[in-house]
Image (tube, rainbow, N blue to C red):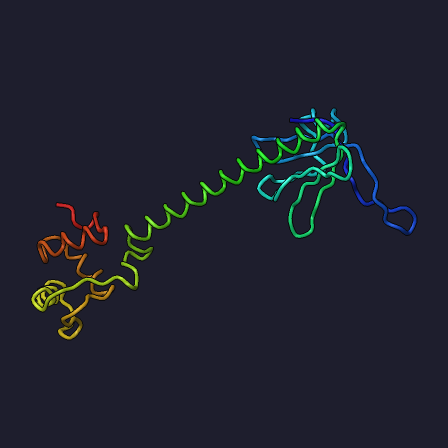
């Protein structure tokens, strides 16, 4: 949607700041998810002309008609920031309000969907992959019996007191994973399944 609207803007007159109505050509760009305005329609049609200003639709709280003033409507950007506009007619005003509201809702829904997708990917990465250093997270633990630890010490040539019965802490688990499947048999398969060390347990 596009067309001329009058925009209320502050302007210096002498030593005072007064509000004046300026005619501007507005373009509701759904592809870029922005409301842009130019000085003239010719400026808007030029590919080399930058808009006077662009408003991201996701920043729009709402667009509402002003019942006290014919043809006027307001775009609320929050934090007491409002853009006051005047259309050519009430029908034109209502069409702009509906178009901005609809485009704003679509842009917000798209942003939320992308955010949810990003959160899902991050969660999947944290739960199925080792950390950047190749070790499980600091909170990861797995139960190992005394015999497992004895065999681990022997194969990995670790100090006798470096491993004790009970939960396996991340450093020990990393050493265990380096031994491969042959070191502890089914225990390694369980670790592979739980912590995602697929590349270290290939046959």
Instruction: Decide which of 4, 179 is in the foreground and name it.
Output: 4
Placement of 147 over or under 5, stated as above or below: below
Q: Is residue 117 left or right of residue 170?
A: right
Quadrant in which the C terminus is drawn = top left
Quadrant in which the N terminus is drawn = top right
Placement of 97 over or under 119, stated as above or below: above
| Residue 119 rendering spot, x and y as whole percentages | 40, 48
Residue furthest bottom as drawn: 161
The image quadrant that residue 186 belongs to is: bottom left
**Which residue lies at the image location 18% right of the left edge and 57% below the top edge?**
178
Q: Is residue 198 left or right of residue 86?
A: left
| Residue 85 rendering spot, x and y as whole percentages | 74, 37
Placement of 203 over or under 49, stated as above or below: below
**Which residue lies at the image location 71% right of the left edge and 42% below the top edge?**
83
**Which residue lies at the image location 60% right of the left edge and 44% below the top edge?**
59
| Residue 66 rendering spot, x and y as whole percentages | 72, 39
Instruction: Decide which of 120, 109 is in the foreground and name it.
Output: 109
Q: Count the marks: how many?
A: 0
The image quadrant that residue 185 belongs to is: bottom left
Residue furthest right as drawn: 14
| Residue 121 rendering spot, x and y as whole percentages | 36, 46
């Amino acid at each position: 949607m596009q067309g001329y609207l009058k925009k209320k803007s502050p302007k210096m007159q002498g030593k005072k700041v007064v509000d004046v109505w300026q005619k501007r050509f507005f373009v509701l760009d759904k592809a870029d998810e922005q409301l842009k305005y130019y000085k003239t329609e010719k400026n808007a049609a030029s590919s080399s002309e930058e808009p006077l200003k662009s408003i991201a639709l996701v920043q729009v709280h709402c667009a509402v008609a002003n019942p006290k003033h014919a043809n006027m409507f307001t775009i609320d950007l929050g934090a007491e920031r409002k853009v006051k506009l005047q259309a050519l007619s009430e029908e034109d005003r209502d069409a702009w309000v509906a178009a901005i509201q609809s485009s704003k809702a679509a842009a917000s829904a798209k942003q939320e969907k992308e955010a949810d997708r990003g959160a899902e990917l991050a969660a999947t990465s944290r739960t199925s992959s080792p950390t950047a250093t190749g070790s499980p997270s600091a909170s990861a633990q797995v139960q190992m019996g005394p015999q497992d630890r004895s065999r681990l010490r022997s194969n990995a040539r670790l100090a006798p007191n470096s491993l004790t019965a009970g939960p396996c802490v991340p450093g020990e688990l990393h050493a265990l994973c380096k031994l491969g499947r042959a070191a502890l048999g089914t225990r390694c398969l369980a670790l592979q399944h739980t912590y995602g060390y697929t590349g270290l347990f290939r046959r």
